[in-house]
Amino acid sequence: MRKHNHDDLAGRQAAASEAKAALLKSHKTAQEAAEPARLALQKERVTAAAARDERKAERTRVKTEEQERVRADEALSQSAQDHVVGDPTHSTADADASSIERGHVEAEPEVARNQAKKRSVSPDQEAAMQKAERDRRYASRKSRQRK
């Protein structure tokens, strides 16, 4: 039979402290070995967060531009409507000059044509035109998101 050298209290305490020291040493060694992987993972997370923030800023910018474009189209539509319904003494040259100032040279005649079409179409045709316009805006928005 083997005789244990740790029969007394002091021997058992020394063996326990040696075991704890060995565990601590192995833990520190494992941490040091895993440090490069931890740093790489942290860097990857920071990069992903930055990319996510950039995408969010881009979506916000596109959304703002779309809202501004819609507001400009509505204002242009309203001015074209006012022009068609408004003062008959208002000349086409004045309308062209004001549209040049606003930067909507091509769009105003198109809006006027659309207004004229709307007056001469049935409700079913108008609904179809609205659906086509909505589908065009949806496709445009999707193509911008894919870029």
Image (spheres, helix red, strand yellow):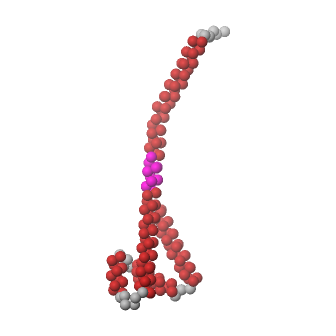
Q: Does the segment drawn in magenta span residue 50? A: yes
Res 110 visible: no
Give me the residue at 57% from left, 12% from top: 10
- The stretch of residues the image draws in magenta is 46-55
Residue 91 sits above or below residue 2 on the image: below
Q: Based on the displayed image, in which of its 4 quarters is residue 15 positioned?
A: top right
Q: Quadrant of the C terminus?
A: bottom left
Left or right: 89 with respect to 74? left
Q: Nearer the viewer, residue 23 or 94?
A: 94
Q: Work out which residue is located at the far front of the displayed protein and give it.
A: 87
Magenta stretch, main secondary structure, is: helix
Residue 127 horizontal/vertical position (percent): 56, 79
Q: Work out which residue is located at the far right of the displayed protein and give it.
A: 1
Left or right: 7 with respect to 139? right
Give me the residue at 47% from left, 62% from top: 146
Q: Nearer the viewer, residue 6 or 9?
A: 9
Residue 40 sits above or below residue 114 on the image: above
Q: Nearer the viewer, residue 139 or 55?
A: 55
Residue 36 horizontal/vertical position (percent): 45, 37
Residue 58 sits above or below residue 77 on the image: above
Residue 72 horizontal/vertical position (percent): 42, 73
Give me the residue at 46% from left, 31% from top: 32
Res 40 visible: yes
Q: Based on the displayed image, in which of its 4 quarters is residue 20 positioned?
A: top right
Q: Based on the displayed image, in which of its 4 quarters is residue 43 positioned?
A: top left
Q: Does the segment drawn in magenta span residue 78? A: no
Give me the residue at 49% from left, 71% from top: 137
